[in-house]
Amino acid sequence: MNSNQIVKKFEDLFNNEPLLVRSPGRINLIGEHTDYNDGFVFPAAIDKEIHFAVAKNDVNLFRFYALDLQESFEMKVEDLSKSDTSWANYLLGVAAQYKKAGYELEGVDCVFGGDIPLGAGLSSSAAIENGFAFALKEILEASVSKIQMIKMAQKAEHEYAGVMCGIMDQFASMTGKKNNAIKLDCRSLDFEYANIDLHDYEILLVNTNVKHELASSEYNTRRAECETGVQILQKYDNNITALRDVSLSLLQKHCEEIDPTVYKRCEFVIKENLRVEKAFSALANNNIKALGNLMYQSHEGLRDDYDVSCKELDLLFDMAKKSNDVIGSRMMGGGFGGCTINIVKKEKINLFSESIKNEYAKITGLEPEIYSVKITDGTGLI
Ligand code: GLA
């Protein structure tokens, strides 16, 4: 990603010299839908990024320009509230968090754009929120930590985009480290970096190029289903505040009292949480095959028990699983579209890409997109 175009547009529109910030998207090796259950995740920031050119103005306006959409947006600072322009809400939502934290807001000009595909499950929205949170910290000279910015970005998503997301995406985008994945405890926010060296293998993302409407409503429903499970199980152990605290044996013991759908959701989360720990050890022991197997299990659970996959993701998964050149594959992110993450033999990347493109297009009539990504540092100044 190159920020020249963004700077040029900023200068054309606002005739001023901006501050430059970059903010990456993320992948997740494993640990899906565990973050809002206080569990573990294993994401990494990637070299698909949003870049920002930002400066204060003295006209008391938020003036934003989304380069990729070629759309502008304007609002008086004193009118700060949710708007009808969905992309602007990510920025406004972050500004609102600074206001809540007691900072006096001023007019801000911002041009942003990037190469994180939208709706692909690579967290373009978290990248936007983080990047703007970082830019505002700089221009307001606010003394906020990375963790505070991550939480503000997450709140922006809850309050201005209406998705009750967990903390994984914002955390990964903000704290990413070159060549490392982050094993994050979403309760304590303690984290550990793990060097990603897949030896003869490489990470390859395949984008279904679909995003089904269901995504955000079903996301919130899954959250509620997990909370229902917790409420029932809390009666048996008042130390339980999230599915993170529930063992498989406790869940199984109370199977009869739990609605079968809620049961399946809880079982998936508990098992997925255990898989993160196993995946972390597998990577540390250079056991890429074991990591890959855990990814297959994760997809099967997301498809059959958590019910957040879709036929396009399942098709890509099936194609990957039957290939001799792949040792791990699964859907990634919230679900209902977006990308699969695959661990593919380096020397077979081209062959695999060609065959998956042809077969997917033949069956669905859609062109999949294939990305080979590098693991990068988190949000920061350019
Ligand atoms: C979305 C959310 C995350 C996480 C994933 C599923 O990406 O934003 O918080 O819950 O879905 O793992």
Image: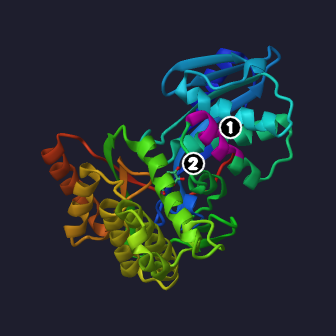
Q: In this picture, which residue range is highlighted in magenta?
A: 152-161
Q: What residue is rendered at 36% in x and 60% in y?
A: 261
Check contact, mark 1 vs mark 2: CB within 8 A: no
> Which quadrant would the C terminus be assigned to in this image?
top right
Which quadrant of the view contains residue 265?
bottom left
Instruction: Label 2, secondary structure: give it.
Output: strand
Disc assigned to residue 238: none
Say left or right for 60 vs 47.
Answer: right
Q: Is 50 in front, or is 120? A: 120
Q: How is colour applied across the structure in the image?
A: rainbow
Q: Main secondary structure of the magenta part?
A: helix
Q: Is residue 104 magenta?
A: no
Q: Which residue is mark 2?
A: 24
Q: Position of residue 224 (x, y in %)?
A: 50, 52
Q: CA distance from mark 1 to mark 2?
A: 12 Å
Crowding near the residue tagged with mark 1, few <14, some 14–19, many ≥20 C-alpha atoms within 10 Å = many
Say left or right for 192 vs 243.
Answer: right
Q: How many marks?
A: 2
Q: Is 273 in front, or is 197? A: 273
Which quadrant of the view contains residue 22?
top right
Query: Which badge, 1 or 2, is on the more N-terminal residue?
Result: 2
Q: What residue is rendered at 31% in x and 60% in y?
A: 303
Picture layout, residue 170 above or below residue 93? below
Q: Which residue is mark 1?
A: 132
Residue type at mark 1 is Phe
Crowding near the residue tagged with mark 2, few <14, some 14–19, many ≥20 C-alpha atoms within 10 Å = many
Q: What residue is rendered at 30% in x and 63% in y?
A: 304
Residue type at mark 2 is Pro
